[in-house]
Image (cartoon, rainbow, N blue to C red):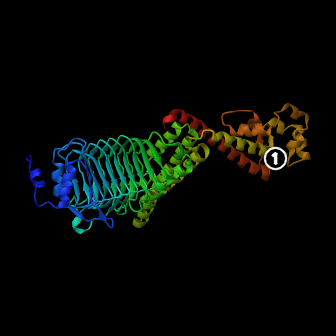
Amino acid sequence: MWTDRSDIYLRSEERTPEERHLIQAWLDGQSCDFELVDNTPQVRIAAAVLFALLQKDLPPRSRLHLSGAVIVGGLNLCPRTADVAVSFTACCFQEPVFISGGGVGDLTLRGCKLPGLLGVSAQFDGDIQITETEIEGVLDLTSAKLSGSLKLSAVSIREPKGSTQIARHPDAPACGAILSNLQAGGGVHLNEVASCGPAQMPALVTGTNLTISGCCFQTAPGKFALCLDSIRVGDNLQLLGCRVPQGKVSLRNASAGCLTDDEAFWRGCAQGYIIDGLSYPHMPSECLRSIQYRIDWLTRGSTSGGSFASQPWRQFAHVLRENADDSAAREILMAREKLYISHEQESIRQRTLAEYCEAFRNANLVALTKALFGTGDYLLRWIWAFLKWSVIGFGYSPQRPFWISLVLVTLGTMLAGYGFEMGVFVPASDQILTSEDWLNAVAINPIAPTAVWSESPSALHYEEFSPFLFALDTYLPVMDLGQEKNWVVTTTTDEGDMGRHIWFAFQAAGWIVTSLGIAAVAGLVQKGRND
């Protein structure tokens, strides 16, 4: 019995032979395929017929397939029976397709053309597969829920033409892929999707993988062409070989079980990307090979927001440590500190420059004095930053002071030996300098009496000069090896006067390097492995 309004509509004598064929095929659970002419559908099917068919009581897991037709009128995919699979192949829709409520199982569009697909808050009991399809307008699945996966492959999204535009919020993009707050039990895969508008996926949640590969997104300069803010990916976030010629890419506060990317993806982000807050406990080993590339990647991604973000550096260092590469992790953290200090110094420089301009413009002496103090602060910070970087690698290279000290002490030993031969060093004893042996040595060689005095009997009972021990005693501020208090540099000659300055600088270097070395070791002990 034909009892409901949909039955009456389907029995109407106004149905064309093709629509009657479709009705019979779908009611029999068979697919309906019409022939194409020059790869173009010619048969016209009213969208109202499809809607009426979906209101029938169909068996669970029914599959309704239509191929090679032009769909006339607006289509609302809202099956009466739950879990109905709907498939369209090589079909042309004259108006946007709407999906409301639940009931749709699998939705498949293959080789179709349509002026938009809107499934806001829709529920799907299966997968959505859109392949080799052209969309003029938007693909909007905001707040939709899928028990399966979403797969877009070789999909082209273009600007709508005139009357095909959909009335939406004024700030909403005219075209693009809108997947905000989408929840997918399976994966979300975008492969070779070319869109003239943005791909907006904030707060997207998927239990498995999110793959964006070989895609192209663009929008107005300064806006976000690919927004992945606050997404939650249970397994692998794959970002491979995409192009974003206009607009930025944002992954603020996104999280994934694993991040797999390639250089082509990030290089394709012409206007930059933001990765502040992006967390990923793991990365494949092949993504960790080039540390210098990763430093460049982090530098660009942590500064695109206009300010410096430290979190991306710490996150990547954590991944390196989990992969037992502490050396690379320290290199990353050193680069982070260097960039942070550079940003801080630039901020001070810009502020000081503005103060100078203001002072000269208003002839304000107080402001000028403040600017001068700002210049002093800038120089002191620069010197301190340079010392921390060169000596201890900002605290992440505690072995560096040892090698610096080894080089300096070796150089000091050579200079001390040469200075002794030149007569630069003399005993630091008034008794020796007034003794008969010393006076005789001065008479024989007024320029370098030490060498002559060393052959005298009184020299046998005095601390012997050792170039190595003198250099070490002068360099280390906390050790007393007896050399520095028993031998001094004379200033009676030009060589001695120069030597006095050299050893003063040598002693200052010892204080700086040893102090920073101790601070580096203590700092690393406090920071631990969670820095």
**Viewer-closest of 224 and 472:** 224
User: Which residue bears the numbered disc 1?
Assistant: 418
Q: Is residue 80 left or right of residue 446?
A: left
Can residue 387 be seen here? The reply is yes
Outermost top residue: 461
Q: What's the residue at 49%, 39% (across, down)?
A: 318
Q: Is residue 86 left or right of residue 279?
A: left
Can residue 381 be seen here? The reply is no
Return the x and y of residue 307 as percentages of the image width and height: 42, 52
Q: Is residue 507 left or right of residue 224?
A: right
Q: What's the residue at 24%, 68% (across, down)?
A: 162
Whether 413 is drawn above or below 34: the answer is: above
Return the x and y of residue 218 as percentages of the image width and height: 37, 61
Return the x and y of residue 354 as percentages of the image width and height: 43, 61
Classify 10 Å Cα crowding around label 1: few (below 14), some (14-19), many (20 and above).
Answer: few
Return the x and y of residue 420 as percentages of the image width and height: 82, 44
What is the number of callouts on the image? 1
**Disc 1 residue type?**
Tyr
**Viewer-closest of 206 and 425:** 206
**Viewer-closest of 245 and 279:** 245
Helix or strand or loop: what does disc 1 sit on? helix
**Viewer-closest of 489 and 62:** 62
Q: What's the residue at 60%, 36% (across, down)?
A: 518
Where residue 66 sits, quadrant-wise, is bottom left
